[in-house]
Image (cartoon, helix red, strand yellow):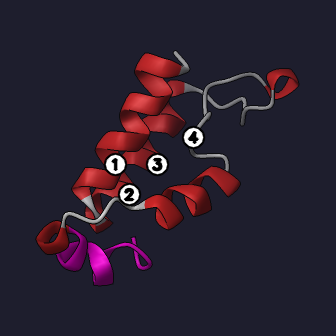
Amino acid sequence: QNQLKPTAAHRDKTHEFPAQELKDLGALGAMGMTVPDEWGGAGMDYVSLVLAIEEIAAGDGAISTIVSVQNSLICG
């Protein structure tokens, strides 16, 4: 949240895709949270996923939507 919020309005105004922010979240395991460890994911449950998405949304709602879609539609 602290890293996303200061630049969220700029991305909204410029329609800039948050590529670096998503790479950073991916490095933290946020792009495959419910994928099992043995398949390269974080191996977390859906409650953990929801809590992470909630925290990301407090910083940037658009990025939280991307993370949500990645984890639910693509990985889930």
What residue does disc 4 label? 31
Whole-angstrom CA distance, mark 2 to mark 3, is 6 Å
What residue does disc 2 label? 56
Q: Amino acid at mark 3?
A: Ala
- Local crowd size for mark 2, using a 10 Å CA cut-off: few (<14), some (14–19), many (≥20): many
Residue 40: which disc?
Answer: none
Whole-angstrom CA distance, mark 2 to mark 4, is 12 Å
Give the side of residue 38 with respect to residue 1, left or right. right
Whole-angstrom CA distance, mark 3 to mark 4, is 11 Å
For mark 1, give the secondary structure: helix
Residue 29 position in % (x across, y down): 66, 46
Q: Nearer the viewer, mark 2 or mark 4?
A: 4
Q: Earlier in the sequence, mark 3 or mark 4?
A: 4
Q: Amino acid at mark 2?
A: Ile
Residue 13 position in % (x across, y down): 12, 73
Residue 70 position in % (x across, y down): 46, 31
Judge whether 20 appears above or below 34 on screen: below
Residue closest to the eye, 17 or 73: 17
What residue does disc 3 label? 52
Q: Splitting the image into 4 quarters, where does residue 6 fall?
A: bottom left
For mark 3, give the secondary structure: helix
Whole-angstrom CA distance, mark 4 to mark 1, is 11 Å
Whole-angstrom CA distance, mark 3 to mark 1, is 9 Å
Judge whether 65 appears above or below 56 on screen: above
Quick check: can you spot residue 75? yes
Q: Earlier in the sequence, mark 2 or mark 1?
A: 2
Count of marks placed on residues? 4
Q: Are marks 2 and 1 in contact (CB under 8 Å)?
A: yes
Magenta stretch, residue numbers? 1-11
